[in-house]
Amino acid sequence: MPRYITNRFMLVFLLAISLFAQSGLAQQSENPLSITVGSKNFNENYLLAEVLSQLFEHAGYTVDRNFGMSGTLIIYEALRTGEVDVYVEYTGTVAQVILNNNDNPSLEDLNAELLSQGVEMMSSIGFNNTYALTLKRDYANELGISTISELAVQPDIDMGFSIEFLNRSDGWPGLVENYGFTQQPVGMDHGLAYQAIDDGSIDVTDAYSTDGDLDRYGLLILEDNLNFFPRYFGVPLIRSELSVQARTIINSLTGRIDETRMRELNGRVLLDGKSFNEVAVEFLAEEGLVARVDNANASSTGMSVMWSNLWRNTAVHLQLTFIALSLGCAVGLPLGFAIYRSSRLSRAMLYIAGLMQTIPSIALLALFIPLFGIGQTPAIIALFLYSLLPILRSTITALLTIDPVLKRVAEALGMTRVQQLRHVLVPLALPNVLAGVKTAAIISIGTATLAAFIGAGGLGEPIVTGLALNDTSLILQGAIPAACLAILAELLFELLERVLVKPHMLVGQLPT
Amino acid sequence: MPRYITNRFMLVFLLAISLFAQSGLAQQSENPLSITVGSKNFNENYLLAEVLSQLFEHAGYTVDRNFGMSGTLIIYEALRTGEVDVYVEYTGTVAQVILNNNDNPSLEDLNAELLSQGVEMMSSIGFNNTYALTLKRDYANELGISTISELAVQPDIDMGFSIEFLNRSDGWPGLVENYGFTQQPVGMDHGLAYQAIDDGSIDVTDAYSTDGDLDRYGLLILEDNLNFFPRYFGVPLIRSELSVQARTIINSLTGRIDETRMRELNGRVLLDGKSFNEVAVEFLAEEGLVARVDNANASSTGMSVMWSNLWRNTAVHLQLTFIALSLGCAVGLPLGFAIYRSSRLSRAMLYIAGLMQTIPSIALLALFIPLFGIGQTPAIIALFLYSLLPILRSTITALLTIDPVLKRVAEALGMTRVQQLRHVLVPLALPNVLAGVKTAAIISIGTATLAAFIGAGGLGEPIVTGLALNDTSLILQGAIPAACLAILAELLFELLERVLVKPHMLVGQLPT
Amino acid sequence: MTSSCIEYEAITKSYGAKTILHGLTFSIAANLTTAIVGESGSGKSTLLQMANGLVVPEKGQVSVFSSIINSGSVTAQRLKIGYSVQGAGLFPHLSVFQNITLMATLQKWSDADIQNRYQQLMQLLELDEDLRDRYPFSLSGGQQQRVSLCRAMMLKPPLLLLDEPFSALDPVTRDIIHAEFLKLQQAETRSMVLVTHDMFEATKLAQQIIVLCDGRIEQQGSVAEIENNPASDYVQALFRAGGQGNA
Amino acid sequence: MTSSCIEYEAITKSYGAKTILHGLTFSIAANLTTAIVGESGSGKSTLLQMANGLVVPEKGQVSVFSSIINSGSVTAQRLKIGYSVQGAGLFPHLSVFQNITLMATLQKWSDADIQNRYQQLMQLLELDEDLRDRYPFSLSGGQQQRVSLCRAMMLKPPLLLLDEPFSALDPVTRDIIHAEFLKLQQAETRSMVLVTHDMFEATKLAQQIIVLCDGRIEQQGSVAEIENNPASDYVQALFRAGGQGNA
Ligand SMILES: Nc1ncnc2c1ncn2[C@@H]1O[C@H](COP(=O)(O)OP(=O)(O)OP(=O)(O)O)[C@@H](O)[C@H]1O
Ligand SMILES: Nc1ncnc2c1ncn2[C@@H]1O[C@H](COP(=O)(O)OP(=O)(O)OP(=O)(O)O)[C@@H](O)[C@H]1O
Ligand SMILES: [Mg+2]
Ligand SMILES: [Mg+2]
């Protein structure tokens, strides 16, 4: 009966995994009227790419969605080489990052330069997504201010800015120079700043002007009356061989979305929890660009890139923690068994494992670079070292607390040390040992995000990126699978425990 | 006998703590010929401040060292208000950060502006501490390059830059614009970049031009031949009422330290592990500014600020982890005792605790701001949540594995549930429960660094700052006390275990 | 007949398909000593543990001092029921003194009362003074068993359930303790149920005997009745076995 | 005299200030059954455990089959020494079958041999077939004790050390097992040391008796010698106590 249950569990589990794996394989198809739409890996860009994709689909195109690419250079390279036909870029970025041979290029120079690379810039969609200073609408009314200049002369304002903003010359230092601020801001994580402002801990923070969070918190953007912040208008970049028909479709967005509208659309994703697909359908209907019909059948493919990213990150994460935990067991368990008899050795080992636990992860990774380079290896070794303490300690303690009468009997029967371990000590210590291993597993899953620091990927990648971009959906793309992995690990260990430990060895309610 | 040992341990422990506490209290003194020297909280600035201090001491001054202040605005404010008489600033910072009403001020305007605030800028000490691109000297020779322009046209160069450098307009974007780079760099932690370059994983990274690490790794600074990077010359800032005598003393440093020399001096601290005091003594002797004498008696006071910072951070850290762990025990232990009989409830609780373990700390802190604001409270609550899993799990498992005969006897004797717990279940489960609590304690000490993200202080403060500044000594000022705390925690728990658990309940070697 | 201290009514108990006790109904007389004897595995310990609620009958009910044993009130009832488990079951983390006096301390007895009772019991059971601060792991089998017995008797419970309390004692010590027990029985009138395999012990200490076989009561009655009129071959064999029958 | 299987030479053992065994020198005859009897706490179990190295003497040495027991070689020697600990000591995580046959499996016995020996022992000790897959927690006291005995005998060791192996058995079962044991003793000649409190059992199963009192040997000799010429009042009291003396 328990074996039967075990097998069924296994079956269901394997099925679930294989389904998950298949869903990650995006289906490719070829078609004469086809187009590839790309996007960067943050909400707004996803959404605009989805809007473009649906427009094309309604015009009869087969759309290949190549969403969620990380980094301007990567997506631009994809456009240049024809792997992507169109994506939405920001004017400031085009000038600064992509075309780097010109100080302050005129629009003409810029276009010429792009054209030489087989790329064209379409007309702006309308919004300018740049830095902004923001504060509670109510509070602004109370103070009677609406521009940055008016803010600069308010004495009792508490300001909290992201570290990046505090350091960029187009951020705080420039503001101080241009507007003559005298207040002293504090630095804090951007994601936390919104919460802090909502909470009243601070009054003003920096934001992106189309940030969907602004409406959520009832924040007002102060007018940049000295035009200090650079401009980042959203513009579609296309391959220059694109047909007139395709260009016309893209141009139907020209000037259609201003900051307020973009903020509101971003908010639908961020706050109302709608999918990009849903919001795109709504938007196109609202604008009269497309009748609101066939909602259902367009839905699933839109997310395939996100899913494949998610699946890849999860797989890497799983691999990292699995290898690290296996190593932790492979070292911690035998070590525990070898040294538990000597309290001096045990203590020494526990001290060492404890010390490693307190080394900050970045410092640990730094130590590893000369030894293991960058990538997955040092990440795994760091995770392994962090898993040692719980495993080692629970092993040692569990072995120490076994009934000495049974230890004595095992000796008396003539078992060798190894046989005693295998047949008596390990089975009796197992529940408490497993408790330590389980804790180590969950902690590993939680801390494997550090792998992203050193280019090893995993679910830390969307989390770290999301934290940097203040993109909740990206954070969740890392956090939710991590949480699922934690539950999965618990389930697996329960299975393992059910197979390895007889139920009567774990007595909660006394049998009567 | 064990009680006697216990008491002696306690005594020694309390003595050690009180000594440590006293060493943190810097002794203040007043004197007619006295001066207060300030410094920012990174190595180079510490060292220059110590050099100034010793110069003054040799001229008969009583020097009050006010070292390690964090942030330009704070130390400048201290200078303006007279709490500090002199410190070393950087020209770029003076213009940008301190005097914010002028776009590109002339030196005259700048001085006038400073004077109006009671401050004067002395002549430059000589070195320019700005951004630089750096690569292995050997590799540069191999390529035959010595300027950034020459680097820009090398096709096969792997570049890794700090995230900040990649994003600052006076960093990578500006370089691309000015020098026409086409290579695509990867982003990585600055501290790790040195290791990566040493390791051959990358070829080029960004650095500060006076960084002591450069010589360690045999790195060459490429000439900024287009003068792109802004200038940050080191200059003493003084209060304008300073006497001629004091000014003369300060001016004896004018032009004395160029980049190479500064790098070499920084290296003595960073690489040779010398104290600021030692290096300052050596420098003054080498320059013939002061005969190398009375080394010993000048030593201890110089570090008093660092010690008091260290002591304060340690105290905060200890407080955070202690409160969080106490909460973890106060919730985890009773909860474990309450639910261990029901495997369904136990599992549910362990899932929840496991989920909390996988929430990224920044996200968790973000959730807390509306509830608990910023500061120590949310940090403690996050640490508390992270400590729950090990405590809860070890409690539940330890209770489940108690010999059922003894549980039965406890019932048969007529004990109430509470009495059973107090007198039978808890003592028998204790070793394995303590194993979980110990693990939780060590993990808490390790992760309490996150408190620094939310302004709660602790040893995370120097670590985070040190990581940002790539200042190993600062990192160590956080990491070493954290490691000591971990050892201390182990020792305390050993004491606790010795008091609470009879030695015969933990049988390693069988008694014969 | 005398009044009863325990009443078993139609008690059935099985584990899986195997029935251990087949609908037993009987009662145990108050203020007397009743010995339960019978085959190993016949359900003696199980019956004993039903009287203090450690084992719950599948069907039927058990009453002690006229109140039904159920989980609600059983904790209070147990204070009046001393129980020594087969095989000692001492708390390994408590010293001999703590094992014996724990419940008295929890019942807030005065220090003097605790010390007196402890001394009395240690003497009664021929235990050395110097065991006081030793831990169970360091006791011999017979010492452990006697400490467990002291623990059961500490609170002077009106009912004692003893599961083979003297099985690990040498004959000389056993004899001495038997004599003391008989004296005590006259001094502190109490009811006692004694599971034993020593028929001599049963006839010496008990007034009533219950013979259990295969989950059924083979015979119940006074010592004389059973010795003189064994109801079955099994009962007769019991008294013959182990040499006693040679007498 | 016959050759000896265990030799104790000037054995002393003390815990703290208290000396348990005072320089004992004696030997145990090979191929016979020797009973060790004596007061509870007199050091019987301790002596037994010295023969398989579980307890190390403070002074003196123990040899089994002419080789000295020391920690170096003891594991191999133990395979030839069956031991049943006072109070069963079964492994709670193993079934009855696994408890009994574990060592045979580790010694790479064939499946058939294991099954045969297992069946033989279960029958010998009157244990039910259906206990096979049960776990120790579900056994009665007497069942546990018998399983422990099976475990000790599984490997057919030439020397058996049994610490009160029948104390939890009812007289009828005990009688049957005694008879079987005597038969077995004739079939598989082996040496056996039996610690017991049942003088009848001692005289019936053993040929030699050692009387221990207060850590000294009070008397050693054949059953007849001791019964007929008790060396002291204590030895006499032992045989008188518990009703046997009434015979
Ligand atoms: N660790 C120890 N510390 C102190 N005394 C001990 C220790 N171990 C055993 N003893 C004492 O040694 C003596 C001999 O114990 P042993 O178990 O050999 O007695 P025994 O003859 O087998 O008694 P029983 O018939 O009750 O089983 C006992 O008095 C016991 O209390
Ligand atoms: N959990 C269980 N599962 C199956 N059988 C059980 C369980 N618990 C007890 N038994 C069986 O119930 C029967 C009665 O057990 P009990 O302990 O009452 O016997 P006993 O008369 O006290 O025997 P002994 O004299 O050997 O102590 C035994 O045959 C035992 O194997
Ligand atoms: Mg029983
Ligand atoms: Mg013994």
Image (spheres, coloured by chain):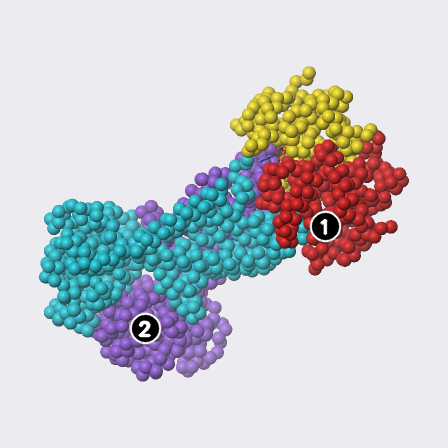
Chain colours: A cyan, B purple, C yellow, D red
Of the residues shown, which amino acid type is indicated by label 1? Answer: Pro
Does mark 1's beta carbon lie closer than 8 Å to ligand 4?
no
Q: Residue at x 24, y 69 (%)?
A: B173
> Depth check: D222 or A282 in front?
D222
Q: Where is residue B40 in the image (x, y as percent from the top left)?
A: 36, 67
> Depth check: B51 or C183 in front?
C183
What is the CA distance from the residue labelled 1 to the residue labelled 2? Answer: 73 Å
Q: Residue at x 81, y 39 (%)?
A: D203
Image-based side of D79 in relation to B65, left or right:
right
Is A72 situated above or below A48? below
- Residue at the extreme top of the image, as rendered: C1
User: Is there any visible trace of residue B161 in the rendered image?
Assistant: yes
Q: What element carries label 1?
A: loop
Disc 2: which residue: B158
Chain of residue at mark 2? B
Q: Are marks 1 and 2 on the same chain?
A: no
Image-based side of B117 in relation to C213, left or right:
left
Disc 1: which residue: D157
Q: Is mark 2 on a helix, strand or loop?
A: loop
Is D188 situated above or below C234? below
Q: Position of residue C90 (x, y in %)?
A: 64, 40
Crowding at mark 1 (Cα within 10 Å: few <14, some 14-19, many 20+): some
Q: Residue at x 70, y 36 (%)?
A: D168
